[in-house]
Image (cartoon, rainbow, N blue to C red):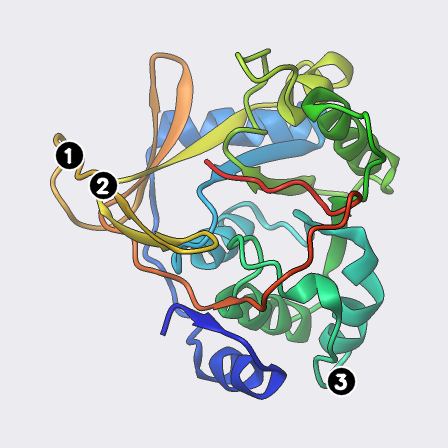
Amino acid sequence: MPCVSSLEALHHAVAGFGAADLNLVIEPPALAAARRSLDESGLLLLGEVHGVRENPLIIRALMQAFGLASLALEWPDDLAPVIAAFLAGGTLTDHPMLWFGDGRITAGHLAVLRERSAGGPLDLTLFDGIIGVGRDWSQRDEAMAGRILAAAPAANGTLVVAGNAHTPTSPTPLGVPLGACLARRRPAVQEIRIQYGGGHYYNLEPGRFRRRTGRPGGHPLLHQQDGMLLLDVPRATEAIVPQQPQPQPSLAPGRTTR
């Protein structure tokens, strides 16, 4: 069941998601590089493809590995009161921005956030805001970077999670991404890019990853290659994503894909 369209079904999916240990393996050079990014910039970027069930488990594993209690997500900032009440122990209440269906928000994310919050203080920033007509892709990313930088710095640093089109730390053919905006202000910041070895995702509709050749299957692995931090996931599975039919308002948050 890749998507759910009612609050009751979403509650059921969140309750049924097991926030289990992913058994992430981190090679020592990658551990040192990620730690430097957190120590020197206060940030560590994680670039995902939305709609993968393993994504929130990766977030959980990285927060555990680096002792982080601060997380920034590419979710609509209008959801902040709803999510704060949910993490305080309340029932998740309805909100139109829960239902865009692009895979940023999944049952697994909500389950992991609730589990992390129950285990101790969780400092959560939602940094995707509505942008006006005429603002382009780079301007949206610059605004998102500004919201991250405006948040109070965390003692051990913040894990920043966004679609992998937004996390590169230098300009791309799309424009100037979030990561590059952050790197201008925090030059030591680094990106972890998730590489999926095959499988499926759900972003507005079901999708399939092309199978990657190379490292055999096994536990997810964070490693360095050619100066990049890569997190290999042997196989991706479709997340359970809240989705309802949406109107097309001129001020809707932009769709984020790979």
Task: Quickly name the residue at label 2.
Answer: 197
Residue toward you, 145 or 59:
145
Is 11 above or below relative to 235?
A: below
**Residue 211 percent coordinates (x, y):** 17, 39
Q: Tag 2: residue type?
A: Gly
- Dot label at residue 106: none
Image quarter (top left, top right, bottom left or bottom right) of the N terminus: bottom left
Residue at the disc numbered 1: 215
Return the x and y of residue 89 as percentages of the image width and height. Answer: 74, 83
In front: label 3 or label 1: 3
Type of the residue with mark 3: Gly
Asked if disc 2 and disc 1 are in contact, CB closer than 8 Å, the reply is yes
Q: Position of residue 21 (x, y in %)?
A: 38, 64
Q: Residues within 10 Å of mark 1 (few under 14, many from 20)?
A: few
Do the numbered discs 3 and 1 sit on residues whose CB atoms are within 8 Å? no
Name the residue located 66 percent from the left edge and 40 percent from the top edge. 254
